[in-house]
Image (cartoon, rainbow, N blue to C red):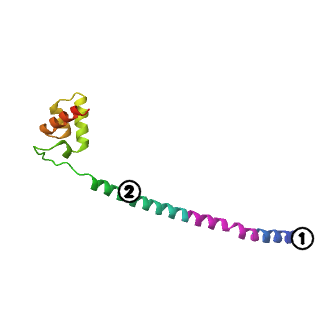
Amino acid sequence: MEFPLILMSAGMIVVIISFFVGNTKKKTEKELEELSLSFYQENNQLKKRLKIIEEELLLSNKPVSQKPKKNNSKASINLILVNQAIALHNQGYNLNDIMQRTSLSQDQVKSILQNGALNP
């Protein structure tokens, strides 16, 4: 008779212990859900910031006109094209090659190279 009583006592102890141990799974699931939600929110915030930065960059870029004017000065030409034309000249490219690679007119390239030579 003592053996069934011992088994029944052990069973009750195991059931009582399981109530305290069983809560860790729910707690872990809740923490994981909160963590994934915070990652989702942070990701959305970063996407919004990136979109704002991209819009600012698009607004600040002023495209160079496709049809060059005869009286274009160095100041009205995009600074990147000016630097590219000077770099190509320093690398030994001739006037026609620089015109093709930068899509600038002959007068613009000559003006850039003359002003670039004066201000090394």
Where the C terminus falls, by quadrant? top left
Residue 1 rendering spot, x and y as whole percentages: 89, 72
Question: Closer to the camera, 79 or 3?
Answer: 79
Amino acid type indicated by mark 1: Glu
Of residues 88 and 33, the one drawn nearer to the viewer in this rendering: 88
Q: Residue furthest left?
A: 70
Query: In front of the other: label 2 or label 1?
Result: 2
**Coordinates of residue 53 in the picture (x, y in percent):** 35, 56
The residue shown at (85%, 69%) is 6
State the image coordinates of residue 14 (x, y, percent, origin top left).
77, 68
Q: Quadrant of residue 71 in the image?
A: top left
Which numbered circle lies on residue 50?
Answer: 2
Residue 14 numbered mark, or none:
none
Residue that numbered label 1 is attached to: 2
Residue occupying image coordinates x 15% and y 35%: 110
Q: Residue furthest front?
A: 118
Magenta-tinted stretch: 15-33
Binning the other alpha carbons within 10 Å of mark 2 as few (below 14), some (14 to 19) or many (20 upward) gives few
Q: Is residue 32 left or right of residue 45?
A: right
Q: CA distance from mark 2 to mark 1?
A: 73 Å
Give the percent coordinates (x, y) of residue 96. 15, 33
Label 1 packing within 10 angstroms: few (<14), some (14-19), many (20+): few
